[in-house]
Amino acid sequence: MSRADGIRPEFADRIPKSLQDGILYISEKYSTAAHRCCCGCGTKIVTPLKPGRWRLTVHNGLVSLNPSIGNWSAVCQSHYWIEDNQVIWARGYTAAEIAANRASDKRALDAARAGRRAREQGFWHRLWVWIRGWFSS
């Protein structure tokens, strides 16, 4: 496959083991989307659909995936957006930009996890943590 300009969404319970070019497989059940890199290199791209990771929007049968796909670990290092089933190519990043992007992604993921933990722990635990923090300051 050559570099893609578009992608077709396919909803499924599970992501298939073998992916076809040009298809964005979406599992709402497992909050995951996956596709083969749009540059044509064949690398499998998995995007967890959760806070701090990627967000999928569907409007009139068209899908968008945010933030962008930065395939920094693969040889191709492709960088693109998926908006309304279209692949919008972005410039490549330098090594320093990739490192900064990874650090930013880690901060966003850590904040999302902390928020989820706080919601799951309940009022009394959050109160105890607040009191303990107040006295240790």
Image (cartoon, helix red, strand yellow):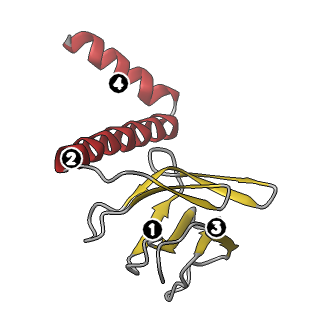
Residue 93 shown left or right of residue 20 in the figure: left
Residue type of the residue flagged with mark 1: Val
Left or right of 126 on screen, residue 13 = right
User: Which badge, 1 or 2, is on the more N-terminal residue?
Assistant: 1
Element type at mark 2: helix
The residue at which mark 2 appears reads as 99
Q: Indicate the amino acid at tag 3.
A: Lys
Marks 1 and 4, how far apart in space? 36 Å
- Of 12 and 116, nearer the camera is 12
Classify mark 3: residues with Cα within 10 Å, few (<14), some (14-19) or many (20+). few
Q: Residue at x 51, y 71 (%)?
A: 34
Mark 4 or mark 3, which is nearer to you?
A: 3
Query: Which mark sits nearer the N-terminus, 4 or 3?
Result: 3
Above or below, 66 against 45 in this view is above
Q: Are marks 1 and 2 in contact (CB under 8 Å)?
A: no
Which residue in the rendered view is the most extreme toward the bottom?
18
Up-down relation of residue 133 to residue 57 (above or below) = above
Identify the residue under disc 1.
46
Quick one: label 1 or label 4, which is nearer the N terminus? 1
Q: CA distance from mark 4 to mark 3?
A: 34 Å
Precedes in sequence: disc 2 or disc 4: 2
